[in-house]
Image (spheres, coloured by chain):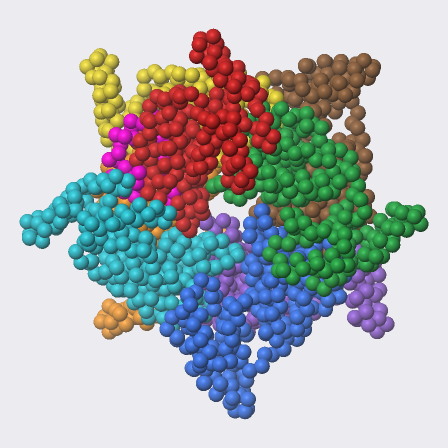
Chain colours: A blue, B purple, C brown, D cyan, E orange, F green, G yellow, H red
Amino acid sequence: MDPAAIEALLKEVSEGKTAVGAAMEKLRNLPFEDMGFAKLDHHRALRTGMPEVIFSSGKTTAQVEAFEAVHAVEPRAEYHDAARAITLTQAATVPGKGMIGVVCAGTSDLPVAEEAAVTARLMGNTVELVADVGVAGIHRLLAQQHTLKSARVLIVCAGMEGALPTVVGGLVNAPVLAVPTSVGYGASFGGLAALLGMLNTCTPNISVVNIDNGFGAACIASLINHL
Amino acid sequence: MDPAAIEALLKEVSEGKTAVGAAMEKLRNLPFEDMGFAKLDHHRALRTGMPEVIFSSGKTTAQVEAFEAVHAVEPRAEYHDAARAITLTQAATVPGKGMIGVVCAGTSDLPVAEEAAVTARLMGNTVELVADVGVAGIHRLLAQQHTLKSARVLIVCAGMEGALPTVVGGLVNAPVLAVPTSVGYGASFGGLAALLGMLNTCTPNISVVNIDNGFGAACIASLINHL
Amino acid sequence: MDPAAIEALLKEVSEGKTAVGAAMEKLRNLPFEDMGFAKLDHHRALRTGMPEVIFSSGKTTAQVEAFEAVHAVEPRAEYHDAARAITLTQAATVPGKGMIGVVCAGTSDLPVAEEAAVTARLMGNTVELVADVGVAGIHRLLAQQHTLKSARVLIVCAGMEGALPTVVGGLVNAPVLAVPTSVGYGASFGGLAALLGMLNTCTPNISVVNIDNGFGAACIASLINHL
Amino acid sequence: MDPAAIEALLKEVSEGKTAVGAAMEKLRNLPFEDMGFAKLDHHRALRTGMPEVIFSSGKTTAQVEAFEAVHAVEPRAEYHDAARAITLTQAATVPGKGMIGVVCAGTSDLPVAEEAAVTARLMGNTVELVADVGVAGIHRLLAQQHTLKSARVLIVCAGMEGALPTVVGGLVNAPVLAVPTSVGYGASFGGLAALLGMLNTCTPNISVVNIDNGFGAACIASLINHL
Amino acid sequence: MDPAAIEALLKEVSEGKTAVGAAMEKLRNLPFEDMGFAKLDHHRALRTGMPEVIFSSGKTTAQVEAFEAVHAVEPRAEYHDAARAITLTQAATVPGKGMIGVVCAGTSDLPVAEEAAVTARLMGNTVELVADVGVAGIHRLLAQQHTLKSARVLIVCAGMEGALPTVVGGLVNAPVLAVPTSVGYGASFGGLAALLGMLNTCTPNISVVNIDNGFGAACIASLINHL
Amino acid sequence: MDPAAIEALLKEVSEGKTAVGAAMEKLRNLPFEDMGFAKLDHHRALRTGMPEVIFSSGKTTAQVEAFEAVHAVEPRAEYHDAARAITLTQAATVPGKGMIGVVCAGTSDLPVAEEAAVTARLMGNTVELVADVGVAGIHRLLAQQHTLKSARVLIVCAGMEGALPTVVGGLVNAPVLAVPTSVGYGASFGGLAALLGMLNTCTPNISVVNIDNGFGAACIASLINHL
Amino acid sequence: MDPAAIEALLKEVSEGKTAVGAAMEKLRNLPFEDMGFAKLDHHRALRTGMPEVIFSSGKTTAQVEAFEAVHAVEPRAEYHDAARAITLTQAATVPGKGMIGVVCAGTSDLPVAEEAAVTARLMGNTVELVADVGVAGIHRLLAQQHTLKSARVLIVCAGMEGALPTVVGGLVNAPVLAVPTSVGYGASFGGLAALLGMLNTCTPNISVVNIDNGFGAACIASLINHL
Amino acid sequence: MDPAAIEALLKEVSEGKTAVGAAMEKLRNLPFEDMGFAKLDHHRALRTGMPEVIFSSGKTTAQVEAFEAVHAVEPRAEYHDAARAITLTQAATVPGKGMIGVVCAGTSDLPVAEEAAVTARLMGNTVELVADVGVAGIHRLLAQQHTLKSARVLIVCAGMEGALPTVVGGLVNAPVLAVPTSVGYGASFGGLAALLGMLNTCTPNISVVNIDNGFGAACIASLINHL
């Protein structure tokens, strides 16, 4: 099923000829389109609620050029350098139901927090970014309690000892996605200390993603915020 | 604020004298009750949406006896041995909005999966357990696609190589909570292999909890299912 | 120099025949007494301000019997099972100048906290124990701020993610000795997660001792409290 | 025995003066030729069925120049930069009996997969390369089942969580050589996560080689394919 | 498709009504039989060439009782305690084409080597066991060269430094399956030293399985020996 | 409360209108000043006895420019490149009561030792630096006993095997802050060997900070020296 | 060559019929005696200067019974439980040339030190044991300088931080064999901390053996002492 | 004691006015010379039999300039860049008693082997270098048996799986110093695999030094060769 066919199907839906549920189901089980060295998964957006991400680190220029090819036949495709992704925004994004709070411990954690915020906004979510509220100065965090409690789901990024998600998790009744960052030195071992800290949290509303994976946290937060 | 006061407040709410939101806010910021060597957090259920869990491993009989004391003044308190928790079910639980799917790779992973299922049901959720669908026999998993796609949120438990959450995550558009188990031998290093596998998943809708932490996964799943 | 000689010297001091400083210096550089298979360091108490500790784990009964022998010639010697130590309280202990606060995250951390508290009291310090104030319920900790700020030095014990010392350290202006405990499961790896968390703290008044080493923390806290 | 002697012996074989088996046995137990700082193992090709590989990373130019010297006396010698090897194709290669399937998860794993494919072809095997069939989109892999089941032996390369060999191994009845790649970030720890995942596979037809060792996997696959 | 149906199909084959290839293909893609808490994969033997192994460590007695149930409806089923497996030998096993050599370094490695030998024999292979030929006494190994060179495929088990597979691999032209064992102490870290040694082998005909996994090595060796 | 208000309050104190204790308490619990992306914690110096340190590694130029802005409104602010910190020396520093000894094993450890010495001096302490007294030449260390015993608190920096703090700790009766350095190669694993050595010290007056964290050690030493 | 033949050969030597060198050379290259499941290496004592050690941990009773068999045909064979070895003292042992000093840090390290001392004495060496001279009380060690400097080779056993070999190595001009012990807790990780400390020593006359391997250290020390 | 005094003392010795033993003892216990930031240990050569080595990695140019200063007052001092050392060859070196064999597995290990060989020769030893005899081609190693058996002590360098010292150790009756090298990739983890392999050797005449530490191995080998 080529992109044109997908468009045709969606057009049928918009004209009421095909019910949304039926169209969705149809797309969800179709085979993918073979591009030779990489299989582009056009209907993944429908199946999993987010576009397939092609991990581009270490790829040759040939793969990057793949975007050129994709873009030629599908001009709406976009290449996001920071997120290392080719995305295809099919029609308008569905707005999330609540606000996603993105919190980070120190300003060194900002790049990861921003990756999460940008990604979540791209997926139709309202995002509030609360920066520099590390646990070493707990009153700074407590002053943001109102914002934290307003969020439907939270993304909390922290390096070094990685304690922030635990403290935030104890203040709210929303699910918290913890993102360990590689910020630190010595015995932080590239984010391992923060990762272990978050996995061993004593707060029961926290789950964890890979080190520096702001993108992944945003995908999950967006899924939850669209429920 | 003692339990009687909490009850009084709740009674006011039920009689319309205090609005729900106002009561909730009031409870959320109150101090806790000091029991000497342990601080019981009665209003935590309101603040975070789930009861405080007191990690009991390694505790002396004296702490277990603490439950006796708690039970004397609050007969509704329950002690859950498997979940290592004292819980206080305040009035009826609020039913979750959808179904939580609990999936496990091998029958050796069943205890962790069952801990998750029992916990989630206790919190008011409908749960479907899909067991023994490890990735080494992918057709067994594919035969369960309908159940997997019906879930509002999924908990996937796996030991050894821990690949199941990644495959499940690619089939659904719900958030997936991955629980590495300590099932395995040799280079599984007590669940480390499964944990690392899940953290490095190439599917963007997966977050991870600690090894064998079925309880934590259920808490988060329930939070999400109540949104 | 046998114990009798030490007593004689100290008597000279009490009678003004030898100045305290001179006596101390004399003791500090003397050889030790050879007992065959173990060298008892009688003047260590004077040289480092605390009695030598003989690590007894794995020792044969013969070494435990050593205490019997020591006790026969020095009836004031005491054997402390919990602290795994033979101590010799020489005359009265010098009282510490302020209060040592001993804080622990969960009740599972109590044994380590109590080891620290008992040891510190044995060395002449006033101790206040603040238990069960883990960071997942930050208001419980904040309610103890007055006690925390009253301490001249703090010992903070925590397992699992080990975040408590960082939060406590941000609230006070006293030195904080962090003690990771082996409380936890799965990815806590026997206290490694808590240890790494404490070493990577973003609060600059925290130093760390070995996992479960409440004894060592108390020794250092007592030294500081006697300055 | 110098190269000329080897040629003479092989000539005798081609003229029927020496039986193949006798010649093989003769070569198999002969000493090697000493070149001063490196011992070239001319008859290794006969003894183990593949040419000796000289690991060249970190070697000084002098060793690379060694090839110049080798090439001067044995013009059929070839230097393969990618494979870091000096090879000596003695007469024509023996064709493998079936097809070797080389599978990789993402396009980032392609370099390792290509190293394996090139090496296997050099050793006389027919190779089919199946790229970009990671387990996060299982239908892409299932669409290649026919190719996978046609292979006599499979090489499966994957980074990140390294789950692909397990899923492929469950679909086929051929031996699978798993190659973890260093593709990934954060908790992939340079391929360690993929390596552990593959070693802990729950499919019993999988063995593993070193991280990024496409060359080694191809050597073993070729050995098996020539049985 | 129940076992009876499988038998009926196989009977058709034996009577020439269905071609072997067609029957095999039919079985290979059929769904499995659902037993409630565990999915028995009757046709796995046909699909992957070996019966499914149910990892039984940590299973409750209920699962072991599962064998009782299986045995009641399929009396040919066997429970193998050492191999932790329920197997179903469908008709006679196909004999392997050559000999499988099983080699071990010290007598402490014998249990793992024997697990491999027993398993390989069960699958129809001729096995020769060469024990106690560790590399510290290389002449013992060289004295077994004839046996080693006669094998079509080799399984080499070693603990401690795990060097044996590398030395054996340099002597033969057959594929070598290396099995690290947990034999050792101190810095062997439960077999990790042997595992790393085998993965870093400088001999290109060696692949590795999990620590103590003699069963897995035998499965792969049998697959290769039946090619 | 802006810096001007802090100054006003302090002026009241100096004029006797407000008691020191009351002013301190007032400042200690005040909220911080919000600067948008980073919260400057003006009264932290009062609350914890040392200025907040903003970890600047990995920060964008924008954050460095933050100092420009801070400096514009508070000209006494200083930027310390080596210490990666913005400090605000409020009035004169309070002199420490004794001498801080900074000891290092080899000349390669000097940068970390100097970081500690500079920081401690900045905080009002007298510092003596004893360099190049590694334990491999114990007489060099013993020759410095007088200096070591004169210190009120000691900072001991060592890489490689990290044994120096243990030996120094046995010679003195002051608290010792051990700083592992990343000096070493091979099995030092970036300072891990020294870190583990220090944590496992058999001298009970030693606590440890992160690898290369001379700054943190100086902060704690200064706190102790001001008691 | 059976034991009788070895005796005959040695008799020839003692009668001057065969030169010692010739006899040694003859023995050194002879094949070993095959006992079925274990190859006893009778002439190893001659080839490497020490009897073969059969690592017995985990062996079945059958292997222990092997000693019974060996003892039946060679009554001089001895079974050493502590050293886990079958030894054959051929004629009288050759006395070592100097004294071997065995040093240990704490009394908990005594078992390993004693294993080393017993083994070294068995091999014909004079041994002096210096116990309980850990680096935390350096004067105890310095008081033993004369003994340390009298040794031709030293074995130094230490657990916890493992610093003793470095300090001893700096005091003497003899080779030092460092033996890390598993004595310790928490971050000693079963002797890993001591092992890393010893490998990173800054004293250049120290080499290291496996954790708790007093036996191996004694073998090497004896070899050196017989040069 | 300044260098001139050392020379004067040595002159007395050469003129028979002071016995060698007396002079040695005198020098052995003297204090060192203080140069401000580094203490040069002139008599270390006498005390430990080898010159002090100043680890220069990471040192500022100022320390390198230290050599200039040393050279100005002691023109016989030499700076060795590869060995990172300032040495002072006092009179002629004492020749070692036998030959030191330096063996390496692959040509990639040559730099470390050459560092060992150069160092050993500098200390007065005869050295024979046997290169490229890795265990994957065991006949190459066996062909060098005569040289190996002629050595009084052996240094064996190997990366990757690090098996060479074990095999060499089984062939000789001399002590073997094993040097793991960082040669390898993937799961060699910078030499860790080779290091663990050597520590777990089943040959009892092997001790180990740090990764790539050819210098240290040569120091110990020279000490042994001078006994």
Query: Does the segment drawn in magenta span residue H132?
Result: yes
Span colored in magenta: H131-160
Is residue G69 depicted above or below H191 in this figure?
above
Residue E48 image point, x, y percent: 34, 62
Q: Where, by quadrant of the figure, is residue G29 drawn?
A: top left
Is residue H26 depicted above or below C49 in this figure?
above
- For residue E17, side relative to residue A61 (left or right): left
Residue D218 image point, x, y percent: 31, 57
Is residue A63 depicted above or below G106 in this figure?
below
Q: Nearer the viewer, residue H149 or E194?
A: H149
Residue at the farthest right position: F17
Q: Nearer the viewer, residue A225 or H83?
A: H83
Q: Looking at the figure, which quarter contains the C terminus of chain E?
A: bottom left
Q: Is residue F181 in view?
A: yes
Residue name at image x 24 percent, y 31 percent: G31
Residue A71 image point, x, y percent: 46, 78
Is residue F100 depicted above or below C165 in this figure?
above
Report how many numbered discs are placed on residues in the image.
Answer: 0
Residue name at image x 16 percent, y 42 percent: D1
Residue name at image x 49 percent, y 81 percent: A75
Q: Is residue C61 in view?
A: no
Residue at the farthest front position: H72
- For residue D121, side relative to residue C14 (left or right): left
Q: Nearer the viewer, residue C213 or H100?
A: H100
Residue name at image x 57 percent, y 60 percent: A212
Query: Does the segment drawn in magenta span residue H120?
Result: no
Residue H224 image point, x, y percent: 40, 24
- For residue C160, side relative to residue H221 (left or right): right
Q: Looking at the figure, which quarter contains the N terminus of chain E?
A: bottom left
